[in-house]
Image: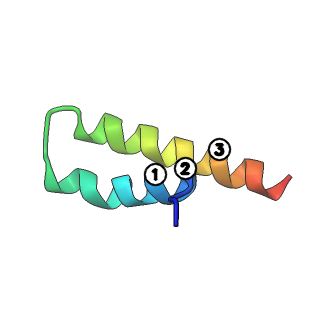
Amino acid sequence: MEETELEYCERMLKELPKYPTPFLSHAMAYVNLRIMHLKKEATY
């Protein structure tokens, strides 16, 4: 079964904290924003 973009983003959000970098908060904010947009698209 192929992973949807939403599932991929949610998995990345869980994986990101395992690899701390100076840009972690920015990366997590970007992924959270992408998840919000994907969920919003799914409701239309």
Q: Secondary structure at mark 2?
A: helix
Amino acid carrying mark 2 in the image: Glu
Mark 2 closeness class: few <14, some 14–19, many ≥20 residues within 10 Å:
few
Q: Are marks 1 and 3 in contact (CB under 8 Å)?
A: no
- Horizontally, residue 13 falls left or right of residue 21, namely right
The percent position of residue 11, horizontal first and vertical second, equals 38, 60
Residue 42, image quadrant: bottom right
The percent position of residue 37, horizontal first and vertical second, equals 65, 44
**Mark nearer the N terminus (2 vs 3):** 2
In space, the residues marked 2 and 3 are separated at their CA atoms by 11 Å
In space, the residues marked 1 and 3 are separated at their CA atoms by 11 Å
Residue for badge 1: 9
Residue visible at 26% across and 57% down in the picture: 15
Toward the bottom, the furthest residue is: 1
The residue closer to the viewer here, 15 or 1, is 1
Residue for badge 2: 5
Residue visible at 33% across and 38% down in the picture: 27
- Horizontally, residue 12 falls left or right of residue 35, namely left
Q: Are marks 2 and 1 in contact (CB under 8 Å)?
A: yes
In space, the residues marked 2 and 1 are separated at their CA atoms by 6 Å
